[in-house]
Amino acid sequence: MSDAPLPSEQHRHEGLPALSEAELHRRRELVFLGLSGVFLGTLAMLNILGVSRFIDLSFEVFGVSVPMPLAVGVLPYPVTFLCTDLLSELYGRARTSAVVWTGLGLNLWVMFILWLGGALPGFEAPGEEGTGVFYEVQKLAFSAVTASMIAYLTAQFVDVHLFHWWKEKTKGKHLWLRNNGSTLVSQLVDTTSVILITHYLAGALPIDEASPLGPQLMTFIASGYVFKLLAALFDTLPFYGTTKLLTRFLRLPPPGEQEAEVGALSHA
């Protein structure tokens, strides 16, 4: 049984006319391309930015200083989970997983271009080979991409799996639960993996050698996760609003009715 609405399916929404099959197909593929493009473009951007700079978002609560160092590459990351949640809701697990695998291929492509750019001869003076802005970007991006590829696959597939697990358990209801539940668990997996891999594999974190390592790693993990946690909570309303808007635009069954109607169609 397919977990996405059939292409010929067209559900009537109040005040909206029926669409031709050609227009229906065009709309659904255009939205799929748009969401996939935002997801993949954001993924490429954050991997290049990666750990190129850490920003200090530390704050005080009741006079107590709370450290919050954050890699600049983390800033656009919550957008990727919003995109995969929307893709999962509108297009099902199979097509969403295909986009996730495409993201892995994109990571490998970025690494290949970075390697090729450094391997080909340049105009550096003798003794300057391997120095300059490009090589700094290459070094940081290699560590960020290596860490993110491992964490990315784990976290994204956890996100997609949990999203559909919650969807099945709630029979298609409670959008907020599958949106936040899947994202919060997958973000924890992702943040922990990226920080540990970036440190132990690439040594790219700004670690104070004079201080204990464990608390510093926990600070980086906690900071990244708190940021992603807040972003995930704040994206609940956009997720609801966008899902409702796109459901009408694409003439899909309203949330909560999709599973029952698709199941009935598949057994017809």
Image: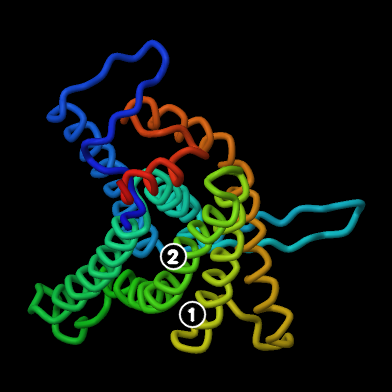
Q: Nearer the viewer, residue 158 or 15?
A: 15
Residue for badge 2: 156
> Which residue: 58% across, 35% down?
237
Extreme-front residue of the structure: 268
The amino acid sitting under disc 1 is: Thr
> Which residue: 18% across, 35% down?
25
Q: Are marks 2 and 1 in contact (CB under 8 Å)?
A: no
> Which residue: 21% across, 36% down?
8
Find residue 51 and report its horizontal and vertical position in percent: 46, 68
Neighbour tally class for label 1: few under 14, some 14-19, many 20 plus, Cα within 10 Å: many
Q: Nearer the viewer, residue 37 or 126?
A: 37
Find residue 101 and report its horizontal and vertical position in percent: 28, 67
Find residue 36 and report its horizontal and vertical position in percent: 29, 49
Q: Which mark is residue 198?
A: 1
The amino acid sitting under disc 2 is: Gln
> Which residue: 13% across, 81% down?
119
Q: Quadrant of residue 249?
A: top left
